[in-house]
């Protein structure tokens, strides 16, 4: 057909003279072949090719062997662990007919029958793949529901693979429920998602769920080594391990990184750990150990020097802090599980240099380092100058390196005898240093509680407004003998006033107080005492001869207010204050005039 030709067939040369003249030689025709990335080229085709998913493979093999194949599967896990690949292998396993065309469902599809070949090429009419990220509506699901009513055209079982199923709308999920619960016998559903929590429980309950795990680093490294060997690529073991760590459990991510590393290397040269480190922006592991040793020793200049060298080689500040955090975790494991130093689960550098470093550090110190780094990484990520923020974190870590852990401080304080906090008389000066501006914090002295007024003053000083007001208005002192106080509370006082007062005094003095309630009248409350003193002072002022003369001269004159100079102590009530009784000094004319707000 005109316009269509295979790669081996060439289109006819263009008519007309050559652009370079009639004598110019004909240009060679270059065949352009599309390159298949490693993630697609080495995609597993059978269950045996799946790596790191032994539980899933064993369960599916047993299901095929016993003929107990579910009608719906839910595959969940992080990106690149094989969810869609597993779905396609399931589709082939359900529809494989064998090389002779007479086979049935098998966990080991042949790969040569028509169904296997068509499914591998993604062109089988009975295996329908839908991306729920771009087909989220109920109409898209309705098309699937309508398609389930028809039998397969070629295959034995019609398989619907819905990727990122959590992206479906609520109405789409609801439309799918009935068909998902009772599908026709010739229909299977395979769902894949990275956000299993977003899938409704009603859908999960109708599916057989499989959680695909992150592939371990050692398994990934072994797999990438085989791929590199198949591609005739020379790669260092440290480079393979760095790629496996950066893949974070994802096979696809790791193969993409391996593809990039191969392309970064010169033609025919080996892929080295240095090349991979530069590509990933990772700090050399030796830098991380140097940094940890400098921080553990509190050597600020050395730590900043390591930071400068790592920065000069292109290491990112955040990545360096994250590597330091990861090393803190590794050292903590080595500290608590010494056998890791002799096993093969850790790299060589961690087993040798890491074990020696872990032996010199304590678990509380490593725990404090972990907490500070965890908080510091967030600060570095948000800072406008990441390198400066990282250096500030290192300086902070070096300064606290030689501080004792909190547990030692607690034990030290517990071993020292506690000095009793005495209740001092009112006139006794406070012991210890006083607080000064910009000076060190002063040691708090025991409060002076010689009278009940001191208790009220202490509550007011601590800004406990509610307790202060209630003590002033509702508390009548019957007996004050620390640490025992007897009170007569007014009927309107809160029921928990005595309990709150006891807790307040115990917190302030360090000793248990007893607040007893008495029916004796007791002294007036502070407010009542002040009102009594004010009334007595007013009556004394009215009886003064000068006041009487003023009233006679100025009939409209009034006493605005009379305020006593000092409230009466509660211990002296009931009775007049000392300066109001018969022994009180006489009021001067100026005092009376000031009280009446007139000139004498």
Image: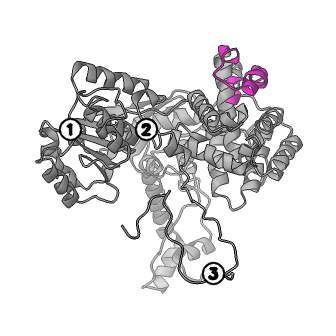
Q: Which residues are magenta?
A: 339-367
Q: How is the image coloured?
A: one colour
| Quarter occupied by the N terminus | bottom left
**In the image, residue 130 lies at what x, y percent?**
30, 52
Label 3 sits on a secondary structure element that is loop
Q: Which residue is mark 3?
A: 18
Q: Earlier in the sequence, mark 3 or mark 1?
A: 3
Q: Are marks 2 and 1 in contact (CB under 8 Å)?
A: no
Label 2 sits on a secondary structure element that is loop
Q: Residue at x 16, y 56 (%)?
A: 142
Image side of residue 397 versus residue 460, left or right: right
Q: Which residue is mark 1?
A: 157
Label 1 sits on a secondary structure element that is loop
Q: Is residue 113 above or below residue 569?
A: above
Q: Which quarter of the figure has residue 98?
A: top left
| Res 84 visible | yes
Q: Nearer the viewer, residue 205 or 425?
A: 205
Between the C-alphas of marks 2 and 1, the distance is: 22 Å
Q: Residue at x 60, y 71 (%)?
A: 591
Q: Nearer the viewer, residue 523 or 394?
A: 394
Between the C-alphas of marks 2 and 3, the distance is: 53 Å
Packing grade of label 3 (10 A; few <14, some 14-19, many >=20) is: few
**In the image, residue 527 lies at what x, y percent?**
44, 53
* Marker disc for residue 82: 2
């Amino acid at each position: 057909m005109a316009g269509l030709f295979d790669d081996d067939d060439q289109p006819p040369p263009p008519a007309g003279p050559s652009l370079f003249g009639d004598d110019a030689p004909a240009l060679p025709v270059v065949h352009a072949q599309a390159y298949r990335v490693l993630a697609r080229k080495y995609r597993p085709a059978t269950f045996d090719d799946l790596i790191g998913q032994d539980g899933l493979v064993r369960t599916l093999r047993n299901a095929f062997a016993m003929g107990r194949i579910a009608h719906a599967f839910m595959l969940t896990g992080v990106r690149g662990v094989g969810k869609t690949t597993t779905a396609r292998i399931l589709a082939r396993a359900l529809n494989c007919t064998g090389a002779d065309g007479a086979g049935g469902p098998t966990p080991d599809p042949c790969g040569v029958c028509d169904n296997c070949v068509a499914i591998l090429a993604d062109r089988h009419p009975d295996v329908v793949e839908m991306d729920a990220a771009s087909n989220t509506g109920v109409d898209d699901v309705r098309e699937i529901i309508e398609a389930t009513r028809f039998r397969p055209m070629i295959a034995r079982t019609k398989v619907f693979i819905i990727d990122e199923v959590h992206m479906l709308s609520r109405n789409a999920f609801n439309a799918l429920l009935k068909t998902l619960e009772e599908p026709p016998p010739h229909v299977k559903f395979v769902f894949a998602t990275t956000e299993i929590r977003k899938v409704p429980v009603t859908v999960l309950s109708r599916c057989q769920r499989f959680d695909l795990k992150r592939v371990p680093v050692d398994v990934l490294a072994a797999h990438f080594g085989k791929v590199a060997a198949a591609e005739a690529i020379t790669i260092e073991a440290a480079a393979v391990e760095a790629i496996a760590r950066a893949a974070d459990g994802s096979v696809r991510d790791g193969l993409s990184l391996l593809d990039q590393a191969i392309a970064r290397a010169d033609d025919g040269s080996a892929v080295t750990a240095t090349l991979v480190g530069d590509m990933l922006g990772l700090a050399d592991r030796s830098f991380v150990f140097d940094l940890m040793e400098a921080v553990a020793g509190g050597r600020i200049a050395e730590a900043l020097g390591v930071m400068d060298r790592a920065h000069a080689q292109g290491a990112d500040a955040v990545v360096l802090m994250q590597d330091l955090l990861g090393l803190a975790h590794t050292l903590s494991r080595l500290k608590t599980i010494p056998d890791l130093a002799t096993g093969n689960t850790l790299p060589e550098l961690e087993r040798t240099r890491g074990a020696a470093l872990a032996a010199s550090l304590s678990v509380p110190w490593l725990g404090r380092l972990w907490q500070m780094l965890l908080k510091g990484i967030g600060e570095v990520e948000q800072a406008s100058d990441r390198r400066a923020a990282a250096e500030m974190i290192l300086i902070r870590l070096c300064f606290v390196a030689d501080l004792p852990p909190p547990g030692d401080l607690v034990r030290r304080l517990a071993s020292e005898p506690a000095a009793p906090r005495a209740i001092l008389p009112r006139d006794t000066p406070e012991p210890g240093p006083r607080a000064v501006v910009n000076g060190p914090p002063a040691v708090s002295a025991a409060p002076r509680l010689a009278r009940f007024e001191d208790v009220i003053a202490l509550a007011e000083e601590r800004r406990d407004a509610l307790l202060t007001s209630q003590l002033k208005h509702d508390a009548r002192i019957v007996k004050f003998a620390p640490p025992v106080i007897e009170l007569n509370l007014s009927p309107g006082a809160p029921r928990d006033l005595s309990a709150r007062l006891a807790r307040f005094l115990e917190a302030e003095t360090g000793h248990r107080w007893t607040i007893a309630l008495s029916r004796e009248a007791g002294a007036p409350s502070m407010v009542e005492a002040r009102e009594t003193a004010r009334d007595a002072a007013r009556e004394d002022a009215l009886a003064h001869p000068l006041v009487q003369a003023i009233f006679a001269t100025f009939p409209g004159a009034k006493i605005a207010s009379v305020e006593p100079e000092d409230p009466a102590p509660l211990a002296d009530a009931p009775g007049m204050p000392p300066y109001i009784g018969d022994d009180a000094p006489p009021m001067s004319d100026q005092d009376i005039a000031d009280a009446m707000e007139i000139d004498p």
